[in-house]
Image: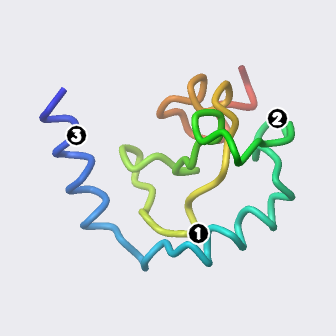
C-alpha cells in the first residue's frame, strides 16, 4: 500500500538518530556472531534473501530508525515478527 510506505518513510526520517553505515552494520553482525537475534540460527550473509535487517522496536510502535534499534534476523523470524514488540514474541 502506497500510503503505508509513505508513512513508514516519514517515520524513519522523523526519528532518525544517526546514520546506519556499512561499518556500523559490520559491527552489529559481529556483535550478533552472524546469528539471528531471536532464534540464534546461523545467518548466511551471502544470500541476501535469507538475512533481514529489522527494527527491534517497530517504527509503528515508536521505535527509532538508527543502529541502536536494528537487528539481523533470519527470514522466518522476521516474517513471523511482523510489527510485534519483542516481549510479545516471547509469549508466542
Q: Does residue 16 appear left or right of residue 29 in this picture? A: left
Q: Real-space Cα distance between discs 3 and 1?
A: 22 Å
Q: Which residue is mark 2?
A: 39
Measured along the vertical axis of the image, is residue 38 above or below residue 63? above
Location of residue 17 in the rendering, given as x and y in whole percent from the top left corner: 41, 76
Location of residue 30 in the rendering, given as x and y in whole percent from the top left corner: 80, 66
Location of residue 70 in the rendering, given as x and y in whole percent from the top left corner: 57, 58
Q: Classify 10 Å Cα crowding around label 1: few (below 14), some (14-19), many (20 and above).
A: some
Measured along the vertical axis of the image, is residue 21 above or below residue 51? below
Q: Does residue 16 appear left or right of residue 36 in this picture? A: left
Q: Are marks 2 and 1 in contact (CB under 8 Å)?
A: no
Q: Are marks 3 and 1 in contact (CB under 8 Å)?
A: no
Q: Which residue is mark 3?
A: 5
Question: Which residue appears at 48% of the width and 72% of the height?
Answer: 20
Question: Which residue appears at 19% of the width and 45% of the height?
Answer: 7
Q: Earlier in the sequence, mark 2 or mark 1?
A: 2
Measured along the vertical axis of the image, is residue 2 above or below residue 86? above
Q: Does residue 62 appear left or right of residue 74 in this picture? A: left
Image quadrant assignment for residue 49: top right
The mark found on residue 68 in the picture is: 1
Amino acid at each position: 500500500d502506497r500510503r503505508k510506505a509513505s508513512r513508514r518513510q516519514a517515520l524513519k526520517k522523523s526519528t532518525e538518530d544517526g546514520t546506519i553505515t556499512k561499518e556500523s552494520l559490520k559491527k552489529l553482525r559481529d556483535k550478533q556472531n552472524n546469528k539471528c537475534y531471536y532464534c540464534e540460527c546461523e545467518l548466511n550473509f551471502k544470500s541476501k534473501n535469507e538475512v533481514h535487517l529489522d527494527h527491534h522496536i517497530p517504527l509503528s510502535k515508536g521505535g527509532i530508525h538508527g543502529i541502536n534499534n536494528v537487528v539481523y534476523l533470519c527470514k522466518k523470524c522476521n516474517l513471523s515478527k511482523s510489527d510485534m514488540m519483542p516481549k510479545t514474541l516471547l509469549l508466542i
